[in-house]
Image: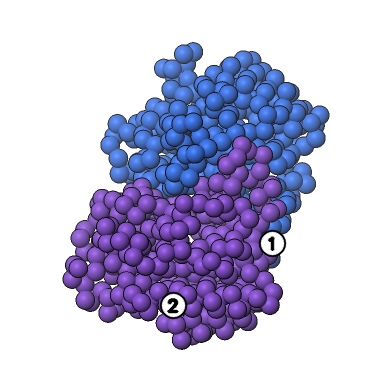
Chain colours: A purple, B blue
Amino acid sequence: VRAITIEEHFWTEDLSRVAAPEIKASPLDELLLDLGERRLAEMDANAIDVQVIGHTVPAAQGLRGADAIRLTRQANDALAVAVRSHPTRFAGWATLPTDDAHAAVEELERAVGELGFVGAMVNSTLGTNGVFLDDPQFDPLFAALERLDVPLYLHPGFPPPVLRELLYSDLPEPSCLSLAAGAWGWHSEVALHLLRLVLAGVFERYPNLRVVIGHGGEMLPFMLRRIDDFLAPERGTGLQDVPSAYLLRNVWITTSAMTALPPVMCALQVFGVDRVLFSVDYPYTPIADCRAMLDALPISPADKAKVAVGNAAALLGLDAWSSSGKPR
Amino acid sequence: LRLIALEEHYRLPSLESSEAVLAFQRDAGFSSDSPMGRRMAKLSELGEQRLDDMDAAGIDMQVLSHSHPTPAEFPPDEGVELARAANDLAARAVAAHPDRFVAFATLPMSAPQAAADELERSVSELGFRGALVNGHTDGRFFDDRSLWPVLERAQRLDVPIYLHPVEPPEAVRRAYYEGLPGPAGKMLSAAGWGWHVDTGMHVLRMVLGGVFDEFPRLQLIVGHMGEALPFMLARSSQILRPALDKPLEQYVEEHLHFTTSGMFTYPPFLCLLLVVGADRVMFAVDYPYSDNEEGRAFMLGAPISEADKEKIAYGNAERLLRIGAHAGG
């Protein structure tokens, strides 16, 4: 196995129709819908053996009401079909109907137990469900993730309208949407989301919970010492330890969409080589650019093998794939 | 190694008992006998105690700037008076110790035309080297044309603006930072996270809003290693490319400078250096909130060439702020 990438996206016809209205039709739509030859050919061309795939934004976070559970199941079932068709090339993240925390737990159990998914990918919930996951209603979800021993991939989502209006309005289009999303806003929101989980004591209550964040760590590696300085126990946070104690124990980082070396080096220096995993963010970022970043990363071959393959195999229980690791 | 520190704060003594200061200390849990409370007590002193603190850590010069609360947080009339008083106070400290202090003006941003005039008075009459502005003005960012008189004047006077963090607008605080135990939400909204990423975002708003196209010689200084911009620059640039006439990196190379204020670890520093280069990075401590000694140890131990160290420790600041050999340039 030459590389495993773990933040790769698809969508289903059903859930693409409930996409946030601001998401316009795009040439990427076809790539998102494909779970077969076209995707495999792109992977082959860039020496990527395995994609771990999750439903793109807004995914099941955007669903409400009576249909939510049914549509979520259909989306996960569709991905499961693709994974079963290409069991050595694809693995799946479950999407969860987070508008109903109880239903989210049930779907996680089904997706892991029956469909063989490696965990759940949840897009930031504030803009869609009105709350962050530190809301106590989600404690059973963290308990289930811990019990099933699968990680949660905390992925960005569009910030809520109030923030879109306050922070990301009154600029020439398409700047507003870009700034609210991939250029800045939804990345800083993922970091905030994770810091809220820390400060709400989630990792003290669920010490074996594993969370993955992408995009080089959503700025957290850059700011981590500053965060510790101002959110240490002596500031009255009520926690046993500084935030980094939980982040470095419970969190893994992927390089999704990061094509530049400096932030990835920063992430490696702060989180350590065992915590950083290669990813692409297919189809939003060109695979070749990400592959070039990995190839150029100035670390030892042993460490690069961890980033490319070993860490993902260990985190997601894909041991069979890493041990059969001959180049195809 | 000569050390010029770029983001060093003071506060008008009359504001120490203001509601803004008391509320922040209460919400953030900074009682006067807490470690941070004791540090903040140094804000209103601009003489021997400060010089002793500088001497103990080998800081040769501080560029003074007024801390929270800024005149921008007061009604326009009151803000104008406060700004004059604050700048006059700093000017007296500079006059008393011209080899140890220079200053950035504080501006009554809620009255933009008066703020531009106060910037001119501070530079032309008091010899200040620019202005430090605390982020948004009542929810308006610098892409808002109502604030452009200040930027226009800064360009005309050929002095930089230091864009400093400030607490988020109240509605942002409610949406993002409520519901956490104790003072955690308050700190998370400020120095623990929020106001840093908001400042990085503010810089992007300035680029996207055409500020640097309108003011092609304007220079901006950003603290805290660049408020996460260096980490995100390649990503942000890729996403924003369709919205801009030239790459985001080009705006950074032509208009931005960065300081080390309050961040004394090497991974973000190296990320910053790899992204922007040694000519655009300057030393800063963030006194009294951060520690002079820690800043000095960080600077001396930086794993970079002596030549680059000299640029970052003082050379770039002397050039940009016209200090020492560059005075009068």
Question: Is any atom of residue B200 visible in this view?
Answer: yes
Q: What amino acid type should be assigned to the residue bearing mark 2? A: Ala
Nearer to us: label 1 or label 2: 2
Q: Which mark is residue B178?
A: 1
Give the structural element (helix, strand or loop) at label 1.
loop
**Horizontal and vertical percent position of residue B303:** 30, 44
**Horizontal and vertical percent position of residue A33:** 46, 63
Q: Nearer the viewer, residue B243 or B7?
A: B243
Report the number of numbered marks: 2
Residue A265 placement, left or right of B84? left
Q: Nearer the viewer, residue B268 or A181?
A: A181
Label 1 with label 2: CB-CB less than 8 Å: no
Q: Which mark is residue A91?
A: none
Residue B327 vertical placement versus A26 (above, below): above
**Mark 2 crowd level (few <14, some 14–19, many ≥20, 10 Å Cα):** many
**Horizontal and vertical percent position of residue A201:** 57, 72
Q: Nearer the viewer, residue B83 or A58?
A: A58
